[in-house]
Amino acid sequence: MATSAKVRIRYLPGISFLVIGVGVLTLIGWQFDIARLKSIVPNATPMNPVTAITFILSGAWLLTWSRYKNKYKAGGYLIACIISAIGLLHFISYFFALDNVRLDYLLYADKIRNSNIPNKIAPNTAFLFLLCGIAMFINNSRQKRAIIVKQSVLIFGFFLAYVSVLGYIYNIQPAYRMGGFTPMALTTGGTFLLLITAIFFSNPGDGLAQSIMSPLSGGNLARKLIPFILIFPPLTGYLRLLGEKRGLFPVEFGVELNTFLFMFVLLVFTVFYATVMNKKELQAKQTQKEISENERRFRTLLYSMKEGVASLDLEGAVVFCNPAFCDITGYSIAELVNRQMIKMLIPTRDRLKFMEWVTRRSSGKDEDYKAQIIKKTGERIWISVKARSMFDYDKKINGALITIGDITDEVVLLQDLNAFTGSAAHDLNAPLSRILAISGLLESYELECEVKELLTCISDTANGMQKLLRDLLDFSRIGSAQLEKVNASLDPIVKEVYCFFSSNFKGSSHIHPLPEANVNVPAIRQLYSNLISNAIKYSSKSETPKVEIGAYHKNGQPVYYVKDNGVGLHEEQVKKLFTPFKRFHHEFEGNGLGLVIVKRIVEKHGGHIWAESEPGKGLTVNFTLAAEMH
């Protein structure tokens, strides 16, 4: 009912000021004896001055309700009680001798007597104030019985005021002069119609008000028909009586003309409304057809995907999933929907970490990660997960969309490869150490130059092989190990690594302050060792070697970089830079694993790495460390 609330807020203040304005003008008319202000119709019964005061109070209640609905309840109840008391007092005064306590008698007795009009508020006016006061008093209640009472009282009051106005239109005194007593003023009747309508719709979500204010076709029809029913028949009736009085046509013709006009206008309205509704219904059917077709295509696409897709609410419960998701997890759609995926699929030791991910998604953070889950059969498998936040029409996060894929075979293969790499590197290291030891012993003997050159070649080859084995062991260890992270300053790590590798470096360096990060310190030390040693090595043959280490912010996240002015790479070479054993400059020593190890360290931290380079202009390696500070 947000739309209805906006409508209520828009029209209530306007009616409030209008009701208050009528009361104020009437009081000015009484104070300065201005007949036109006391009654809009010359020689007609003027509005009683106390009636004007009560209308001002009623307008004040409306204004308070529209602007400060829940802030000033006590003030609203007080105004409602005063209005009810005024109405009740002046109504029962017609049955009991209470003139001494009547407000109009006490405040304006002389002015009323001098105006030669009845000196009492009309009984139907007093009764209507009593009804309005009761409706105002219970207006804040949400109980069904109170809403029914309020709306019944207001509907009865509306028709009582409406009949009084019709009495003036048709000159039928019993309609506005209840029991032959003081007549209700025409201005009073019209103001009551406005006031009662405003009170009735002040809570547009209540009962009949909700039906009338509804944006659906029924509410739309009611909003068009009700004004027509209330205005058109009295208008045609008045014109008919006017024509008969002036002798323009006989009574029989007037009845027939009135009936014809009413039926004709109602028929035109019905045809027009039916045409409009038919167009809307056709448009709605076309829209529904397009929605159904789009939904069918979407479901076909979703059901044909090999990846599992599921939508989760903010608590991590499954709202929807496709068959592939069921195939991967082993559960049926009925078993998954409305249940928390974490409790069904995630091992107990990992649930806290998954709840942290769910919390981060509720704040709009998207994540890609790998995880182990337990299928319905009890089998443990590895899945890749892509989690994205979902938004409603108000751009508020209302859940997450996740895509999963079974990567168990790839993980097992990688684990086997890591195990083989580590085992092979360890087994090969022993004979290489013996070769180096024997080579060192032989170099202590006096040998021919050619033999010494061969021994040097053997030692260099064995040292290079040993360096390769160490890199293979590092590659294997980083791939399989769980990195423990702490908040650390990177500045001392970088300075220590740079000092170690720059002892023979004859170039310049610029090391900028780096932001702290949540990292594994040994892994980050190895990352900077590989990057800084590469930068020094590949810029060493430049005329003025230069190395720069620093960081900058992009999209609110720190990006770290190591930059040199060495030989550089072509665009196609940059794309293959992080491929294992890939080398582009054979005049420099290396085995093609240094940057691959760097990439793995970055990924283990949840970050991303990329390079920028041009031939002869050096290389810049950029990377992020996505782990959040705690």
Image (tube, rainbow, N blue to C red):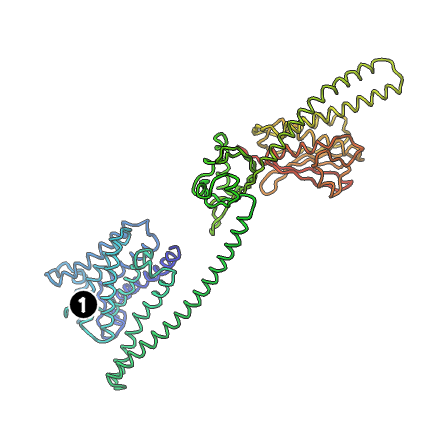
Mark 1 sits on what residue? 112
In the rendered image, residue 251, in percent from the top left (x then y), is placed at 23, 83
Q: Disc 1 on helix, strand or loop?
A: helix
| Residue 113 visible at all | no
The amino acid at mark 1 is Ile
Residue at 52%, 52% (x, y): give it.
Answer: 298
Q: Nearer the viewer, residue 267 or 186?
A: 267
Residue at 31%, 59% (x, y): give it.
Answer: 209
Q: Quadrant of residue 62?
A: bottom left
Q: How many marks?
A: 1
| Residue 178 visible at all | yes
Q: Residue furthest left?
A: 97
In the rendered image, residue 6, in percent from the top left (x then y), is placed at 39, 57
In the rendered image, residue 117, in percent from the top left (x then y), is placed at 17, 70
Q: Quadrant of residue 501?
A: top right
Residue at 52%, 34% (x, y): give it.
Answer: 373
Q: Nearer the viewer, residue 297 or 490?
A: 297
Q: Nearer the viewer, residue 325 or 442?
A: 325
Q: Residue 511 vs residue 44: left or right?
A: right
In the rendered image, residue 363, in percent from the top left (x then y), is placed at 49, 42
Q: From the image, which quarter does the N terminus lie in? A: bottom left
Q: Residue 301 vs residue 208: left or right?
A: right
Q: Nearer the viewer, residue 293 or 604?
A: 293
Q: Residue furthest top?
A: 445
Picture layout, residue 29 above or below residue 137: below
Q: Residues within 10 Å of mark 1 (few under 14, many from 20)?
A: some
Picture layout, residue 386 above or below residue 115: above
Picture layout, residue 74 above or below residue 208: above
Residue at 45%, 45% (x, y): give it.
Answer: 319
